[in-house]
């Protein structure tokens, strides 16, 4: 009966480990999504920077059309960057939630693993105690038998 309970507890530990792994995978996915949007934000910053340089060059060359195109590129890049920043914030919130969920599932698994380990150790100690008690009983029985035999031989 104790062995069946221990096996059930081991299955629970395995289940919690699988849930922890699932949460870990979700955290990695969310972290990658945050990194991805951060990289796109940096690319948009570079586009805006290049558009500013083009605009300055157009001003120096007195090319109004090129200057207007550069201004439009800058504004578009700024708009995309603001939108990407909103997406980054949303993804960061999801990442934080995924991290909390992963940490929580990891703690639960570790707690359950400790309970399992403690019970397994107690069972092993009890088993060793029973084996030692049986060994002691055999030793005492043999000693009594030997003592009784010696008394019988001394009476004869």
Image: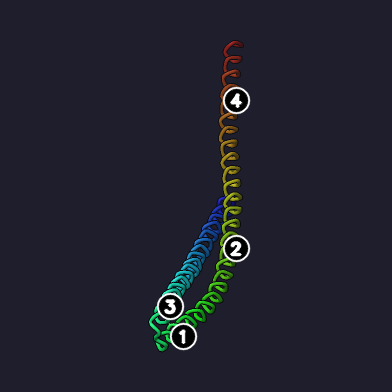
Label 3 – label 4 distance at C-alpha: 103 Å
Mark sitting earlier along the chain (3/1): 3
Residues at discs 4 and 1 in contact (Cβ within 8 Å) = no
Q: Which residue has dot 1 on it?
A: 72
How far across and down, in percent of the image, does residue 118 sit?
60, 46
Mark sitting earlier along the chain (4/1): 1
Secondary structure category for the residue under label 3: helix
Mark sitting earlier along the chain (2/3): 3
Label 4 – label 1 distance at C-alpha: 100 Å
Residue at (40% x, 89% y) in the render: 65
Residue at (56% x, 76% y) in the render: 86
Secondary structure category for the residue under label 4: helix
How far across and down, in percent of the image, does residue 79 sit?
52, 81
Residue at (59% x, 10% y) in the render: 154
Position above or below: 133 against 121: above
Secondary structure category for the residue under label 1: helix
Judging depth in this view, the residue of 49 and 143 nearest the camera is 49
Q: Which label sits on residue 100?
A: 2
Label 1 – label 2 distance at C-alpha: 42 Å
Residues at discs 2 and 3 in contact (Cβ within 8 Å) = no
Mark 3 vs mark 4: in front: 3
* Residue farthest bottom in this picture: 65
Q: Which residue has dot 4 on it?
A: 140
Q: Which residue has dot 3 on it?
A: 56
Q: Residues within 10 Å of mark 1 (few under 14, many from 20)?
A: some
């Amino acid at each position: 009966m104790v062995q069946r309970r221990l096996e059930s507890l081991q299955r629970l530990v395995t289940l919690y480990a699988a849930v922890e792994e699932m949460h870990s995978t979700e955290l990695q996915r969310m972290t990658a999504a945050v990194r991805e949007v951060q990289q796109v934000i940096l690319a948009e910053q570079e586009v805006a920077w290049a558009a500013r340089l083009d605009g300055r060059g157009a001003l120096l060359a007195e090319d109004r059309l090129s200057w207007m195109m550069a201004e439009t590129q800058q504004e578009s890049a700024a708009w995309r960057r603001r939108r990407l920043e909103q997406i980054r914030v949303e993804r960061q919130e999801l990442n934080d939630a995924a991290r909390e969920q992963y940490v929580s599932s990891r703690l639960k698994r570790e707690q359950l693993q400790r309970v399992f380990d403690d019970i397994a150790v107690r069972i092993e100690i009890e088993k060793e105690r029973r084996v030692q008690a049986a060994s002691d009983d055999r030793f005492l029985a043999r000693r009594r038998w030997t003592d009784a035999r010696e008394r019988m031989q001394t009476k004869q």
